[in-house]
Amino acid sequence: MHAYWITFDQQQSPSVLNLGAGVTAIDRSDAESLIREHVFPLYGERGITAVLDDVDVRDLDAAHVRPNIGNVLERGVWFPNLGRWRGQL
């Protein structure tokens, strides 16, 4: 499993996705699939601008991202913290 930080095309209107999204997945393809399946239906689809592999959460935004993440050790989306979905295989 790998932790990924994904950034998107920025929008003028406020959105959590302007910060990015965090996901733990088997590989990059799995990470992008999880984003499409669980994040885009809630926050709208956007173009992916970058994918950071094996992200260290200590390097993420201390004010907005780190206090609001879910479990980085389980497969699934951990930011935005969807809470109800854990991504079991």
Image (cartoon, rainbow, N blue to C red):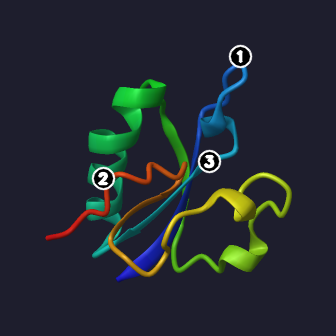
Instruction: Report the Cα–Cα distance between label 1 and label 2.
Output: 24 Å
Crowding at dot 2, Cα within 10 Å, few <14 / some 14-19 / many 20+, comes out as some
Please state, as top left, top right, bottom left or bottom right, where the N terminus lies in the image.
bottom left
Residue highlighted by disc 3: 20
Question: Height in image: 2 above or below 17?
Answer: below
Question: Height in image: 74 above or below 43?
Answer: below
Mark 3 belongs to which amino acid?
A: Gly
Asked if the residues shown at circle 3 and circle 2 are in contact, with their CB atoms under 8 angstroms apart, the answer is: no
* Residue 34, numbered circle: 2
Viewer-nearest residue: 11 or 70:
70
Seen at 85% across and 56% down, the residue is 63
Label 1: element kind: loop
Q: Residue furthest top?
A: 13
Residue highlighted by disc 1: 13
Seen at 73% across and 17% down, the residue is 12
Sequence-wise first label, 3 or 2? 3
Seen at 60% across and 76% down, the residue is 55
